[in-house]
Image (cartoon, helix red, strand yellow):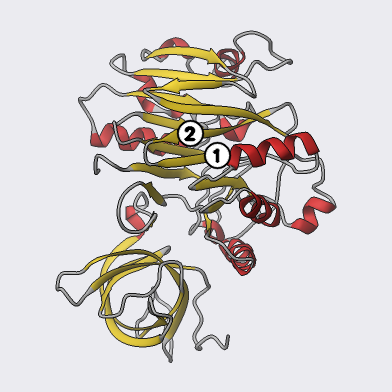
Amino acid sequence: MSDNVTKLGFWGVRGSTPTVDRANWRYGGNTPCLEIVTSDRTRIIFDCGTGLRGLGNRWIQTYPDTPMEAHIFVTHYHWDHIQGIPFFAPLYNEKNKFHFYSFRSKHLGSGSLQRVLEAQMATPYFPVDTSAMTAQRDFTEIAGGDTIQINGMKLTARWLNHPQGALGFRLETPQGVLVYATDNEPGVPELDKSLRELAAGADIFINDAQYTPEQLAGPKKGWGHSSWLEGVRIAEEAAVKNLLLFHHDPDSSDKMVDAILGLARQKGGNVWAAAEGMIMTMGGPGAAVALPSTRTGQRRRTHFPAVVEGYGEDGAPFSESTIIHDLSLQGAFLYMRHAPRLQSEVRVKMEANLGDVERNGPIWLKGYVVRREPGPQPNMTGVGLVFTSEIDIEAPDE
């Protein structure tokens, strides 16, 4: 990683409970966990959902003999934000060191986070207790309004509107500002104002979008979550550069998240739907978003002829024949003579047979451009796409 880049990796983006439903594969089923690696190699983790397990396994594979140290911030103590801790393998290695931060719960008192960790691993809920965790651990209590310094970077915490309390975080790095504000329900003026202050001018704003506006106004009112529409409003009012829709409902299929993303993008601005394996960067050249890289088992090297239709940097439409070299459930990577605009929508036609399904016509996919890089030749551009539609035999009408 370049010395002037802060990298964000999404290891879990689902809310409430993990899911392995096939309909949710593309965006992922693990509960919240975000890894941040700053330009000076400081490692920060936001939330410890089931995505934390995959992060820990990746660390062990990549750095088998290297002592690891990280700062871990837990927004609150609901199961979906802590249930990955017992399965975080680096905690069982005495070479490692972890600094935990969260708030003092009025229901638990002093040392809330440590008590939560010990309780979920207590008999009869878990086969071993925390004494099996040999890594060094320390716990720091923070509250809304607090600011702390981490290796010269400023982190600010603010209260969010969520049952039993939750914190949102603003991390200011030399490369940009990241705001993580999951599990928040709008409607309390003081906290709504505080969230907009937290998000002000952020390069990346990760916000709760679990419910639709209709659900939020009806049966899900009081459950402590927000909607894509509220996220768009905050992003506009706070001059956010990139909005990430996060904490997808376990009952929201990939197709439903696609539809939510489409509605949000119609309102304008740079809007993304967080996906497990997505990488975002701040401070470096090129695109801010890269294709998912953690679910390698779902990626395939291919040689599919394809036609890509879209709009170039100058706004002119184009149609180009090319070859897809890398294909996954999430997207594709290919080389083109045209350089489509970042975040512009494209249509891809492939003459291919996927799986055991025989198709009599071309396969059309919709997607958008999330990555551009120099190609192997001066007149070529590497283009990364994320697909946002179901496979369809006929070309889309719209």
Hey, which quadrant is residue 87 in on the image?
Answer: top left
**How many numbered discs?**
2
Q: Secondary structure at mark 2?
A: strand
Q: Position of residue 172 (x, y in %)?
A: 46, 34
* Residue lying at the far bottom of the rendered structure: 360
Give whichever of discs 2 and 1 has the lower sequence position: 2
Asked if residue 308 can be seen in this view, the reply is yes
Q: Position of residue 357 (x, y in %)?
A: 43, 79
Which residue is depicted at the point 34% across and 35% down? 38
| Mark 2 burial class by Cα count in 10 Å: few <14, some 14-19, many 20+ | many
Q: Is residue 283 left or right of residue 263?
A: left
Q: Is residue 223 above or below residue 358?
A: above
Asked if residue 183 can be seen in this view, the reply is no
Q: Is residue 366 above or below residue 159?
A: below
Name the residue type under label 1.
Tyr
Q: Secondary structure at mark 1?
A: strand
Which residue is depicted at the point 45% across and 21% down? 149
- Tag 2 near tag 1, CB within 8 Å: yes
Hey, which quadrant is residue 212 in on the image?
Answer: bottom right
Q: Position of residue 370 (x, y in %)?
A: 40, 63
Which mark is drawn over residue 113? none
Q: Position of residue 66 (x, y in %)?
A: 22, 25
Name the residue type under label 2.
Leu
Which residue is depicted at the point 69% across and 35% down? 194
Q: Quadrant of the N terminus?
A: top left
Hey, which quadrant is residue 353 in on the image?
Answer: bottom left
- Front in this rendered view, residue 265 or 209: 265
Mark 1 highlights which residue? 180
In this view, the mark in front (2 or 1)? 2
- Front in this rendered view, residue 209 or 318: 318
Mark 2 highlights which residue? 171
What's the distance in space between the residues labelled 2 and 1, CA to CA? Answer: 8 Å
